[in-house]
Image (spheres, rainbow, N blue to C red):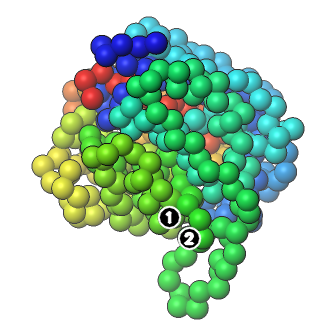
Amino acid sequence: MSNSSTPLVSADTEWSPLRSVILGHAANSCFPQAPSHMIKATMPEEHFEEFRPNHRFPAELLQRADEELAQFASILQEHGVRVYRPKSVDWSKTGGYTAAMPRDGLLTVGNTIVEACFAWECRQQEIDLAFANILDELEKDSSVKVVRAPKVARPEALYEGIGSRQDGAHEWAINNSRPAFDAADFLRFGKTLIGQLSNVTNEKGVEYLQNAVPEGYTVELLDVTDEHAMHIDATILPLRQGLLIYNPERVTEAALRKHKVFQKWDLHAYPHLPSPRESPPRYMTSGWLLMNVLSLDEKKVVVEAGDVEFAEYIKSFGFEPIMCPFQHVNSIGGSFHCATVDLVRQGD
């Protein structure tokens, strides 16, 4: 049990000193399954054929990814961060995806952990199978609240009517028939959460999240220009209070300035194009994943070892990049922010 000076769950920002995280596992991960229109809306075209039932990622890639995760865990522990790891699951036997990306499914807001209402049917059991033991342990503390996602009777209902619009306007890959959201579509800025509608997050999902977070917190939606939107943590990157880097291909400064929380912030468009990479393949992401870093505090940031140009860029703002190889984790769908759920950030 915790006491008032050592909470088990307390996080209101993305940058305050990190003290406790959940960190994923890559073993036994499979390519996620989803309807073809969802894959086309969210995944790189050259890899469409990989997204078929119970199709494992290459074994060597997963082994290398888990080695990278182990190195990342050591870095976190060396900086005084407590690390929780999930159960091992054979995702080919469950029709699931991975335990490597817990940020997609869990969002810490204050003393509350909210489980996502996944749009993708293959992810419906992900938290229960891999992370429930961690959540159960945390929930034994009376100060911690866990909001579990409702069970979905007909996941396929989210896709009904998609493609029937006649006006030519952009249409997301899901409808608004029931709440759907990925936790990775939202970031914390004190009492304000900034999120986006996307191919996995709808209006009812945003309403659900607003009702699930503690009293006093508000959820606001950022106007993004990315029709392939799925997770916001390669679109905007708050590095510390008052400083944010953004992806100019997905959002504008004008859109950011509409939010009161950003009106006095320094906002910087990342000035370089990400470098292409063929090996290991980016099966599920673009090069903009370089923005998907993890802040240990307002000075230290964990950056992928190959993203030297990005590391030099954030150095210009006074940051110390901690370089960690993570390209094989990148291959299965995310980077440092995706692979962690920050449970405690000191001083939030």
In the picture as drawn, the residue positioned furthest to the front comes out as 142
Which numbered tag is attached to residue 41?
none
Q: Which mark is residue 176?
A: 2
Whole-percent x, y for residue 182 in the image? 54, 50
Q: Residue at x 44, y 28 (%)?
A: 144
Query: In this orientation, which residue lies closer to the viewer: 83 or 330?
Result: 83
In the picture shown, does residue 49 fall above or below 162? Answer: above
Q: Is residue 315 visible?
A: no
Q: Quadrant of residue 213?
A: top left
Q: Which residue is mark 1?
A: 204
Q: Image quadrant of residue 281?
A: top right
The secondary element bearing badge 1 is classed as helix
Q: Is residue 5 left or right of residue 329?
A: left
Residue type pointed to by label 2: Asn
Residue 233 x, y percent position in the rendering: 44, 45
Q: Are marks 2 and 1 in contact (CB under 8 Å)?
A: yes
Element type where label 2 sits in the image: loop
> For this rendering, which residue is in front, 23 or 237?
23
**Is residue 18 visible from the viewing direction of this image?**
yes
Q: Going by the image, does 273 lie left or right of 298? A: right
Taking the spot 62% from the left edge, 51% from the top edge, the residue there is 150
222 above or below 239?
below
Identify the image quadrant of residue 301: top left
Image coordinates of residue 98 in percent, x first then y, are: 70, 37
Residue situated furthest left in the rendering: 264
Number of numbered discs on residues: 2
Q: Mark 2 and mark 1: span between their CA atoms?
A: 6 Å
Nearest the eye: 136 or 99: 136
Image spot of residue 292 (x, y percent): 45, 39
Crowding at dot 1, Cα within 10 Å, few <14 / some 14-19 / many 20+, comes out as some
Horizontal placement of 4 versus 157: left or right? left
Residue drawn at 72 percent across, 33 percent down:
129
